[in-house]
Amino acid sequence: MQKKTWIGIVTAAALLIAVLWFVNRLTKQTEAGLTLRVGVVLPLTGDLASYGKNAKDGIELAAQELNDMASKGGGGAVRISLVVEDSKGQPQPAVSAFQKLTTVDRVSCVIGDVATSSTLAIAPLANSSKVVLMSPAASAPAITDAGEFVFRVWPSDAFEASVVSDYLEKKPYRKIGVLYVNNDYGQAMLRIIGERLKTFGGAITDVEAFEQNTRDLRTQLSKLAAAAPEVIFLVSYPKDSITFLRQYAELGLQMPIVSTSSFEDPQILKEQGKVAEGVVFSSPLPADETDAVVGEFRKAYEAKYGKKPGLVADYGYDALRVLTEAAKLVGATDGEALRSGLGKIKDFHGASGLINFDKNGDVIKPAGLKTVRNGEYVWLK
């Protein structure tokens, strides 16, 4: 046989092997389903680390479950690849983390942040890069208008503020002193509660702001007390709430205290539980405990971590699950496809309850009231 003939046969065989290899690989990829590369930007250190770690635990549990399902094969499975970065609960570290995730790790979506200021800082980057940003806990109303690629599974402060104002009206409290952290979150809550008070004749007797991580609130507390409010509305984060409670007690103050969902942190009860007794605060209403998804989540969480889910753990879990559902609905994982898929979500059963998004990417969920009773957080009936 001539040499050219042998070369032709070898070349044809090599081509056939290459085609078969490609087809085999393509078939395996199809069987394995989609792969969703997810960036995570959460405070793993700093004042909000307890929230960030809880959310991270929920996300990693969801990823484990999804990857277990993907490994079993079958159409529609989505494999999850996570890359986690620490935002420290501050805008600049959050921006740096987001830029790294999108340019180096090439993620198509990011779960984060739990802090409003950090979420708002990275929102413009999400929109410009067409990467979906899904916050598990940021609550400021400004996020509603943060852009078409920005979503959240935690309800807006507008819901919380309405619940608090209804409580103030029914007590009835008409003279309210406000102490708030001077950032997007605090300013939004101040504005909303002020607007709601006017609807039933309430008024703010004094407003005092403070910078996050302050060590001394005595001046602000003294001014609030001098204005003789019937109740203090506190908008703060756990570390500053602890400072507030300690110095509130030192000054011998007796006014009732109402607050927001950020008051629910075990460290507050550990350090200032006696002073916190009776504080009333808003919180998203819990999911139906009889729901199978809710029950399975809590069971799996306790099995994996040896403890009950902390605040926002179920929201972190749902943030990843709903992104995965969006990818399934459209059969793709790029940012624009995910945004489209999220718009198709209808009554998604999550660990935190039913999830639907409005046209602005806000989740539709009601809020209720909790209080501190006998050193524990309980629902106020």
Image: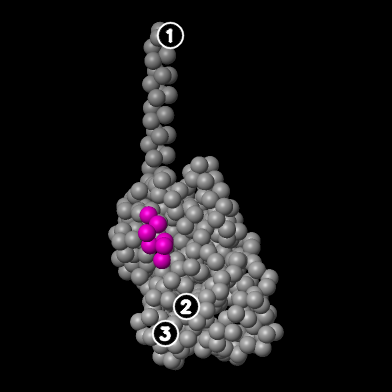
Residue 283 badge: 2
Q: Secondary structure at mark 2?
A: strand
Residue 3 badge: 1
The secondary structure that dominates the magenta segment is helix
Mark pair 3, 1: CA separation? 98 Å
Residue 252 badge: none
Q: Earlier in the sequence, mark 2 or mark 3?
A: 3
Q: Which of the 4 image quadrants contains residue 271?
A: bottom right
Q: Is residue 138 above or below residue 353?
A: above
Q: Residue furthest top?
A: 2
Q: Is residue 305 left or right of residue 106?
A: right
Q: Nearer the viewer, residue 343 or 347?
A: 343
Q: Earlier in the sequence, mark 1 or mark 2?
A: 1
Instruction: Report the magenta residues as a range.
Output: 141-147
The amino acid at mark 3 is: Gly
Which mark lies nearer to you, 2 or 3?
3
The amino acid at mark 2 is: Ser
Q: Is residue 8 left or right of residue 185?
A: left
Q: Nearer the viewer, residue 211 or 51?
A: 211
List the residue tagged with mark 3: 202
Q: Is residue 280 above or below residue 302?
A: below
Q: Which of the 4 image quadrants contains residue 24?
A: top left
